[in-house]
Image (spheres, helix red, strand yellow):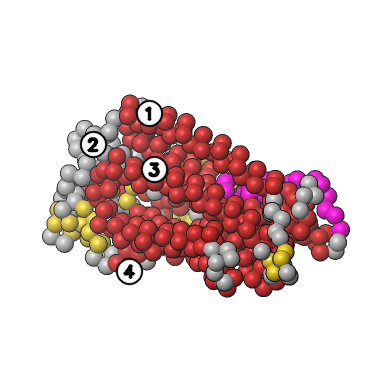
C-alpha cells in the first residue's frame, strides 16, 4: 500500500481511538463538578458517596485519555516530520500552553479530588472539581486552536518554506476557532450528560442504588437539554464558517458538483461518475439557507473547486509563488517523484459522514425525550418501564458516533491539504518512513489498544455495577 495512505490510516486510528476518551473525560468533568457542588450544599452522606464515585470513574477515563494522546504527538516526528517542520513555529505556542496551563491544572486539582478529602475544606474540594473541568476544557481550546489553524490558517507568514508566527492572536483566533470550540465542547457536554443518564438508568432498572440512579437521570437530562438546544446555533455558526472559509468542503458535504445554491439532502448516495446525488432532497438551496439565510446564494461546486485546488497545487509546488520576499515553498517534501494528489476531498465519505452526524443528532433528540419521560415518572414517584430504561443504556452511543463522524467531515473535507491551501498531505510525510514500518506499528497499536480497551471496559463496568460505596456517619458528620 502507499505510504501516504498507511500513514493517514495509522494517525486516523490513533486519533479516533484517543477521541473516544476525550469527550467522555471532559463531558464527565462537568458532572463531577455538579455532584461535588450538590454535596457541598446538602452535606448528605448519600451525596458524598455519589461525588466520590464520580471522581473514581472520571479518573479511569482521564488516565486513558492521557495514555492514548501521547502516541499522536510522537507520530508528528516519526511519520509526519515534514509537517512538523512546516508548522512547528505555529504549533509550539498552543501545545505548550495546553501542557503548562491546562493539563497541569486539570491533573493537579484531580489530585486534590483523589487525595484531599478530609484534608482540605469542602469549599476547596468544590473549587477543585470545577477547576478540573475548566482545565480539561482549556485543553480542548488549545488543541482546537492548533487544529483550527490547519483548517483556516491566520497570523503567519511563509519564510524559507515554513510557516512562521507573526501574530499570536491572529493565529489563535483564526476564522474557525470560536465556531469549532463551541461546537465541539457542546457535543462533549452532550456525551457526558448522556453517559450519566445511561448509568442512572442502569441503577434504576437493576434497583441497585435508586437514589444514585434518580440523581443521575435528573441532573443528566437538564444538562443534556441545555446542550442539545445550544447545538443548533453552534452548528449554524460552524456551517457559516465552512461556507465562507472552505466552500470546497461544503461542496463535498452535499455532493454538489456545479456552481449554484447548495441543496439540502436528508440522505443519499453520491454517483461520482455522473456527478449526481441519488437520495431524498429536503430543499433546493437548503444548505445555502442554513449557512447564509439565503436559499438563492450561490457557492462553488466540486468541478470549480477542483480547478482552484489544481491551480493552487501548481503554485505551491512550482516555488514561484512569493510572499514577504521569501520563496513560498522550498523542499518541504515535494519532489518530481511525488504522485499528483487528488484535487478535491473524497466526496463519498465526506457526504456520508456529514449526513450521519446530522442523523445522529436526531437520535440524540429522540433519546433525550426518552430520558425526560423517565424523569417525569421519577418526579411523580412512579416506576419507569424496564424497556425504556434499557433503551437509555445506549444513549451515549449516539453522541460519541456523532462526534467521530464530525471529525471525519472536518478532516476528510480539507483534503488534499494538511494545512489548508499551504501544505499538501502527500508532502507532509516523513521522507524516511516506509510501508513495512507503518504496517508493523499499526499491528502493534491494534494489539495494545485492544488490550487497553478490554481493561478499561472491565474496570468501568465493575465500578458501575458496584455503584457508590457506603459512607460512614460519625457524630452527625459525614466521614
Q: Secondary structure at mark 3?
A: helix
Which residue position holds label 3?
71
Which residue position holds label 1?
439
Tell me the quarter of the picture where residue 29 sits: bottom right
2 or 3: mark nearer the eye: 3
3 or 1: mark nearer the eye: 3
The quadrant of the image that shows the C terminus is bottom right
Q: Position of residue 438 (x, y in %)?
A: 35, 31
- Please report whichever mark, 3 or 1, sits nearer to the chain's N-terminal start: 3
The quadrant of the image that shows the N terminus is top left
Which labelled disc corresponds to residue 105? none
| The magenta segment | 382-405
Camera-nearest residue between 82 and 355: 82
**Alpha-carbon span between mark 4 and mark 3:** 28 Å
Q: Are circles 2 and 1 on residues that touch, CB within 8 Å?
A: no
Q: Is residue 291 visible?
A: no
Please check the rendered image and state whether residue 106 is part of the magenta-colored stretch, yes or no.
no
Q: Residues within 10 Å of mark 4 (few under 14, many from 20)?
A: few
Amino acid at each position: 500500500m502507499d505510504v501516504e495512505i498507511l500513514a493517514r490510516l495509522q494517525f486516523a486510528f490513533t486519533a479516533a481511538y484517543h477521541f473516544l476518551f476525550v469527550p467522555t473525560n471532559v463531558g464527565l468533568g462537568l458532572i463531577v463538578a455538579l455532584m461535588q457542588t450538590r454535596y457541598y450544599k446538602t452535606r448528605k452522606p448519600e451525596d458524598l458517596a455519589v461525588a466520590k464515585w464520580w471522581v473514581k470513574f472520571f479518573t479511569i477515563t482521564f488516565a486513558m485519555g492521557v495514555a492514548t494522546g501521547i502516541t499522536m504527538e510522537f507520530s508528528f516526528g516519526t511519520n509526519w516530520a515534514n509537517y512538523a517542520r512546516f508548522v512547528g513555529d505555529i504549533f509550539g505556542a498552543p501545545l505548550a500552553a495546553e501542557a503548562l496551563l491546562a493539563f497541569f491544572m486539570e491533573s493537579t486539582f484531580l489530585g486534590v479530588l483523589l487525595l484531599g478529602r478530609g484534608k482540605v475544606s469542602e469549599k476547596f474540594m468544590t473549587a477543585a472539581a470545577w477547576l478540573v473541568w475548566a482545565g480539561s476544557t482549556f485543553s480542548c481550546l488549545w488543541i482546537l486552536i492548533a487544529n483550527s489553524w490547519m483548517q483556516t490558517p491566520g497570523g503567519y507568514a511563509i519564510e524559507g518554506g515554513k510557516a512562521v508566527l507573526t501574530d499570536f492572536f491572529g493565529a489563535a483566533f483564526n476564522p474557525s476557532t470560536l465556531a469549532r470550540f463551541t461546537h465541539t465542547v457542546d457535543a462533549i457536554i452532550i456525551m457526558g450528560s448522556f453517559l450519566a443518564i445511561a448509568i442512572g438508568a442502569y441503577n434504576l432498572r437493576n434497583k441497585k442504588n435508586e437514589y444514585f440512579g434518580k440523581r443521575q437521570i435528573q441532573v443528566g437530562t437538564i444538562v443534556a437539554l441545555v446542550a442539545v438546544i445550544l447545538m443548533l446555533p453552534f452548528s449554524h455558526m460552524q456551517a457559516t464558517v465552512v461556507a465562507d472559509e472552505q466552500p470546497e468542503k461544503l461542496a463535498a458535504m452535499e455532493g454538489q458538483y456545479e456552481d449554484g445554491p447548495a441543496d439540502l439532502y436528508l440522505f443519499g448516495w453520491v454517483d461520482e461518475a455522473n456527478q449526481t446525488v441519488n437520495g431524498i432532497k429536503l430543499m433546493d438551496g437548503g444548505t445555502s439557507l442554513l449557512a447564509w439565510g439565503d436559499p438563492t446564494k450561490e457557492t462553488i461546486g466540486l468541478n470549480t473547486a477542483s480547478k482552484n485546488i489544481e491551480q493552487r497545487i501548481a503554485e505551491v509546488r512550482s516555488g514561484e509563488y512569493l510572499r514577504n520576499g521569501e520563496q513560498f515553498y522550498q523542499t518541504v517534501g515535494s519532489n518530481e517523484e511525488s504522485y499528483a494528489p487528488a484535487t478535491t476531498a473524497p466526496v463519498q465519505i465526506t457526504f456520508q459522514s456529514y449526513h450521519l452526524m446530522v442523523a445522529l443528532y436526531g437520535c440524540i433528540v429522540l433519546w433525550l425525550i426518552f430520558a425526560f419521560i423517565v424523569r417525569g415518572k421519577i418526579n411523580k414517584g412512579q416506576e419507569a418501564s424496564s424497556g425504556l430504561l434499557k433503551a437509555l443504556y445506549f444513549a451515549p452511543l449516539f453522541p460519541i458516533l456523532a462526534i467521530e463522524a464530525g471529525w471525519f467531515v472536518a478532516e476528510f473535507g480539507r483534503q488534499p491539504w494538511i494545512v489548508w491551501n499551504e501544505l499538501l498531505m502527500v508532502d507532509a510525510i516523513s521522507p524516511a518512513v516506509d510501508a513495512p514500518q507503518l504496517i508493523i506499528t499499526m499491528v502493534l497499536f491494534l494489539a495494545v489498544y485492544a488490550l487497553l480497551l478490554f481493561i478499561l471496559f472491565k474496570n468501568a463496568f465493575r465500578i458501575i455495577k458496584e455503584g457508590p460505596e457506603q459512607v460512614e456517619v460519625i457524630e452527625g458528620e459525614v466521614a
